[in-house]
Amino acid sequence: MMCAAMIFKEYGKDRKDTIILLHGGGLSWWNYRDQAEQLSSAYHVILPVLDGHAGSDAHFTSIEDNASEIIAWIDENCGGQAVLIGGLSLGGQVLLEMLAQRPDICRYALAESAAVIADKLTGALVGPAFGSSYGLIKNRQFARLQFRSLHIRDELFEAYYRDTCAIEKQDMTAFMKASTSYVLKDSIRSVQAKVHIVIGERENRIIQQSAEKIHTSVSGSTLQIIPDLYHGEFSLNHPDMYVQKVNEIITDQKK
C-alpha cells in the first residue's frame, strides 16, 4: 500500500482497530515484524517504511514531513485516528512530532528511546563521519561488528545487513542529522493521547534526559525504565514483552 511517497506494510487487514509502529533509524519495517504478526489476531497493524530507508520510494527530508505523511494516511484510511502508535528512536521522534501536529491522532502512544534534546556535537560530526566510513557499510565483517555494538538479537542480522546496504549516503546523513537535532515541540503539551515513555536502563545520557523531558511536558504520561536494556532492545529483542505492553496499555485504558 502507498500514501504519497511512503510505503506501508499491513497485517490483520480485516481488523477494525489500527495500530501503527514506526521503526528506528537505519532499520526498516522488520523492526516490528514479530509484534505485527502477534497483534494482527486482534488489530489492523501498519508498519510504515520511513522515507530514505530500505524499501522506501522517497529520499528522507525531515521528521516533520514523515509525520505529516503518516497523519495523511491515517486521515484517509482510519477516519483520522489510530488506536495506538508506537515508535523507536527516529520512529519515536516521528511519533512525538505527529502528536505535536495532531494532538488526537491516536488514543495511546508508546514512545521508545526517543531523543528530544539536540546533540549539536554529534550532529556536527555526522557528515564527516559518514563521508569517511560510508564505504565500510557494505563490508560484511564491519557490519557484523556494528550490529553487535547495537545489541540486536542475532536472527535480525541478515535483514539489518541487507537494508543498511540499501540506504543511500545522502539519506543516512539526512536522517541522522535530523535525529540528533530534533527537539520537542511546545504543542506536545496539548496532546490528547495517553502517552507511555519507555527507555532501557543502559541508555545514554541524552535519551535519559529526553525521557524525563517528555514525561514532564506531557500531562498524565508514564515513564518506564527497563532494567539492563540498551537502546532499542525493548522492541528489537523482546517482541513478546512489547506485545504484552501494548495489550496492557489498551486493556487498562478500556476498563
Image (cartoon, grey):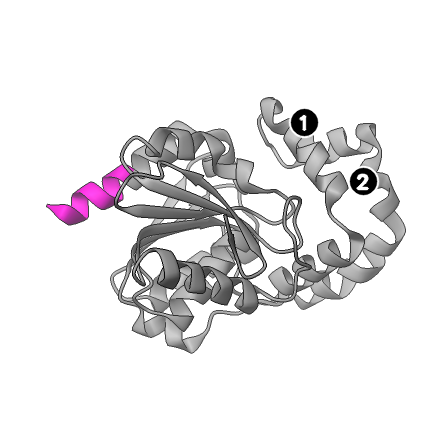
- Mark number, residue 158: 1
**Residue 220, quarter of the rendered image:** bottom left
Disc 2 crowd, CA 10 A, few/some/many (<14, 14-19, 20+): some
- 117 and 76: which one is in front? 76
Residue, far left: 255
Q: Secondary structure at mark 2?
A: helix
Q: Amino acid at mark 1?
A: Glu
Q: Vertical placement of 142 versus 52: above or below?
A: above
Q: Vertical placement of 59 versus 187: above or below?
A: above
**x 66%, y 44%: residue:** 54
Q: In the image, is 49 to the left or to the right of 244?
A: right
Q: Is residue 209 visible?
A: no
Whole-percent x and y of residue 173? 74, 58
Q: Amino acid at mark 2?
A: Ile
Whole-percent x and y of residue 62? 61, 66
**Residue 152, quarter of the rendered image:** top right
**x 77%, y 51%: residue:** 168
**x 66%, y 34%: residue:** 160
**CA distance separating discs 2 and 1:** 13 Å
**x 32%, y 47%: residue:** 18
Whole-percent x and y of residue 200? 47, 42
Q: Vertical placement of 1 versus 189: above or below?
A: above
Q: Which residues are magenta?
A: 247-255
Magenta-colored stretch includes residue 250 = yes
Q: Which residue is mark 2?
A: 137
Q: Is residue 255 visible?
A: yes
- 36 and 185: which one is in front? 36
